[in-house]
Amino acid sequence: MHSFLSRLNTLFAFTISVLAVLTIGVFISTYFEKYHETVSIGVNKPIVKHMTDYSANRKKNDLGVLQLNLDMNLNQLFDWNVKVLFLYLIAEYVTPTNSLNQVVLWDKIIRRGENARIYLHDIATKYYFWDDGENLRSNNVTLSLAWNIIPNAGRLLHVPANGSTSFIFSDQYTTSRAASPKSSS
Amino acid sequence: MLDIEWPFPTHMDFRGQKMAERLFQVIIVFFGLIGFLAGYMMQQFSMTIYSVLFGVLVSAVLTIPPWPMYRNNPVEWQKPSNSTKETNKNNASSSSSSKSPNKDVRKPPKGKKDQ
Amino acid sequence: MELFSFVDDIKRMDKRQAIYQILNFGMIISTALMIWKGLMVVTSSESPIVVVLSGSMEPAFYRGDLLMLTNYREEPIRAGDIVVFRIEGRDIPIVHRVLKVHERDDGYVKFLTKGDNNQVDDRGLYAPGQLWLEKKDVIGRARGFLPYIGMVTIVMNDHPQLKYLVLAVLGFFVLVHREN
């Protein structure tokens, strides 16, 4: 602390230390938070098509098509250590070839400050529901929502929501031009 | 370690340096605590950061420039004697950033006791 | 008044002092290395801390943010996880999110990833003919997050001369500085 440069250096270093301590404080203050919330998921008109998957192995695979209803209010989740919420809807099912399949059908980014109320009705899935094979007919699929908490500093948590739903695909292929997902893969 | 001649005055005496360092530490910690509480109340971490940055600004204005209050205890040099005692000259130059501005010069100024 | 008074310090150094300085330097280097290796063991990941290099995961991660990874075998890859992976034959690690997972009875897993800020999935990024990622491509899953700390790495990657300059200056000062 003798010269001008020393004073500047010490001030800067002290500031950084204080910021670090405060960041640790924020982290500790939200460490035990669970971020649970209840949501409502609905499915309309689940059908299965049999088509060539040009985005993957160029073979004929099963393509599931359905419409979603999503209803939730997540404003309570935004405490002072939550920067972004990444919501994702997973379709989980079992096939004879694969003991576990998970496909994300829909996702959304909610930043702090944005409205975290979601009310969507009869929307198409955001991503194509391709199976790795041809085993969607009559398959029992569970839809569950989860969110990834992106903090200001700390752990990246994946929290499953309360309120999942299941449905069973029809046992026949549909060949008509029924509803298809709106965007490209 | 580096002695640069700045175009503006930068000198503070030792008591002043100690006072300045203590002052900015108190100010920044104070604004840090206020910011932490405010941020917690409002659940907005940005409030905490702004509070600390404001504290840094206030501190910088108060402690970086050599205000007169930091020059109230100038080092009292002994009168130069005839022999080549160069020790006083060496002590006038800035040494490395050791955090004890209390460390007195080798020839203690007369009648000054640091508490 | 000289500008660099430590040049005197160097001249005053005898052989013992010089050896002490070098050993001190070696201690610092090996401590850093041991901490890194220790983290590798604790997290089971070959790169326990990574810096986000691209903007493909905005607004969650920006360039310069720091991620802490784990790669435990008992924790399977699931949809929604943020994984850091390397495409076979390429150096650069990529931080993206898992979009699809297909796991077989024998334990073989394949998955597809996509960056939050990208419109399409990562099949365009994979090696020619590669449709899926496998466990072996994964460096780890992002578990912890610190903002901005990795900015230094970004700046030094963009300006390699700066990296060498900083290393040279730091090394020089560690070797020369004396704790009086």
Image (spheres, grey):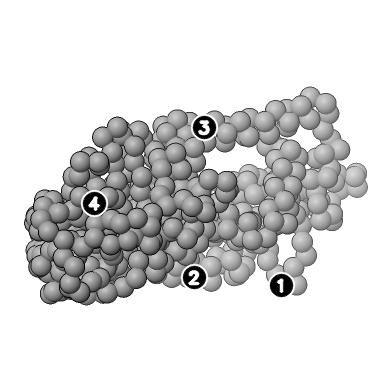
On the question of residue A1 being in view, the answer is yes
Label 1 crowd (10 A; few <14 / some 14-19 / many >=20): few
Looking at marks 2 and 1 on the same chain, the residue that comes earlier in the sequence is marked by 1
Mark 4 near mark 3, Cβ–Cβ under 8 Å?
no
Q: Chain of mark 3?
A: C
Which residue is located at x 49 percent, y 58 percent? C125
Label 2 crowd (10 A; few <14 / some 14-19 / many >=20): some
Q: Chain of mark 1?
A: B
Which numbered circle lies on residue B8?
1
Instruction: Give the residue at mark 3.
Output: C37
In front of the other: label 4 or label 2?
Answer: 4
Mark 3 near mark 1, Cβ–Cβ under 8 Å?
no
Instruction: Give the residue at mark 4.
Output: A134
Report helix, strand or loop for mark 1: loop
Q: Chain of mark 4?
A: A
Which residue is located at x 9 percent, y 68 percent? A44
Looking at the figure, which quarter contains the C terminus of chain A?
A: bottom left
Which residue is located at x 44 percent, y 39 percent? C136
Task: Please name the amino acid that badge 2 sits on.
Answer: Leu
Q: Nearer the viewer, residue A119 or B93?
A: A119
Report helix, strand or loop for mark 3: helix
Task: Please name the amino acid that badge 4 sits on.
Answer: Glu
Task: Please name the amino acid that badge 1 sits on.
Answer: Phe
Looking at the figure, which quarter contains the N terminus of chain A?
A: bottom right
Q: Report x, y in % for residue A178.
A: 17, 73
Instruction: Give the residue at mark 2.
Output: B57
Q: Nearer the viewer, residue A30 or C153?
A: C153
